[in-house]
Image (cartoon, rainbow, N blue to C red):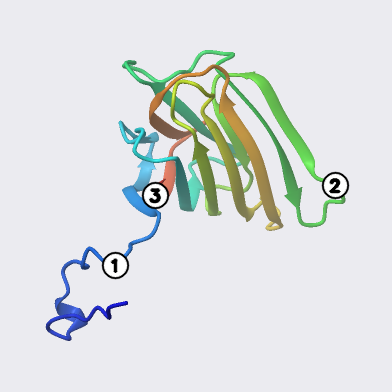
């Protein structure tokens, strides 16, 4: 085994890593900061290059109180996002501080994949979503975990499984709010 050293011994001057150094299986595809916008699009980033994807929402604040964050997809060859009733389904559990049991939310005939972000329009949430697969032989699926505070400042955790109901290769994902605008940082990674 060879030891790899930097030629100039200065980390401040490194502009790229040698090919022998692995960068891991996560590849940042896009990072977007939303500031009071209607939606965030990850356009044309879903390809057959990656087995799965990781989407992070950081410091996400909805423009209105007790709102839903919504996800829609665009299939290969389409010019618009799927938004008809019956395109999507989801089921999830929401756990709240002070509540004895989780509350369920479910829709098997939805016009978007969504989960509620409780709280007022100043409270931030964070989420991670695992997305897989992209190909036309399977449904487009997401496993979403979200944390934040509700309007009573109680901690809330939400876990939702979402999917597009029919098999299709997906090329793009849109994130929006059911009412008002959205703020936050969104990062999409490809997983090799």
Residue 182: quadrant of the picture? top left
Q: How many angstroms separate mark 1 from mark 3 (CA)?
A: 24 Å
Figure check: 150 above or below 18: above
Q: Nearer the viewer, residue 30 or 21?
A: 21
Q: Dot 2: within a 10 Å radius of its alpha carbon, few (fewer than 14), some, or many (20 or more) residues?
A: few
Tell me residue 168's x, y (percent).
46, 19
The residue indicated by pointer 3 is: 187
**Residue at position x 44%, y 43% from top?**
53
Q: Give the labeled residue for mark 1.
A: 21
Residue 43 or 176: which is nearer the viewer? 43
Question: Is 41 situated above or below 96?
Answer: above
Say which quarter of the image contains residue 16.
bottom left
Label 3: state its secondary structure.
strand
Query: Residue at image x 38%, y 60%?
Result: 24
Q: Nearer the viewer, mark 1 or mark 2?
A: 1
Task: Give the alpha-carbon distance from disc 2 to disc 3, as whole Å.
Answer: 32 Å
What residue is pinned by disc 2?
101
Q: Are marks 1 and 3 in contact (CB under 8 Å)?
A: no
Q: Which of pointers 1 and 2 lies earlier in the amino acid sequence? A: 1
């Amino acid at each position: 085994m060879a030891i790899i050293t930097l030629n100039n011994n200065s980390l401040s001057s490194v502009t790229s890593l040698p090919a022998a150094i692995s960068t891991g299986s996560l590849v940042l595809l896009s990072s977007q900061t939303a500031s009071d916008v209607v939606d965030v699009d990850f356009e044309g980033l879903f390809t057959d290059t990656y087995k799965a994807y990781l989407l992070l929402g950081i410091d996400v604040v909805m423009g209105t109180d007790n709102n839903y964050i919504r996800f829609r997809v665009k299939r290969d060859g389409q010019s618009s996002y799927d938004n008809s009733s019956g395109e999507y389904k989801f089921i999830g559990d929401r756990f709240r501080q002070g509540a004895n049991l989780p509350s369920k939310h479910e829709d098997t005939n939805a016009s978007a994949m969504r989960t509620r972000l409780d709280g007022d329009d100043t409270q931030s949430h964070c989420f991670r979503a695992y997305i897989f697969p992209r190909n036309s032989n399977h449904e487009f699926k997401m496993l979403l975990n979200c944390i934040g505070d509700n309007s009573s400042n109680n901690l809330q955790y939400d876990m939702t499984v979402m999917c597009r109901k029919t098999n299709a290769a997906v090329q793009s994902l849109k994130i929006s709010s059911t009412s008002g605008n959205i703020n936050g940082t969104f990062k999409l990674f490809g997983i090799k």
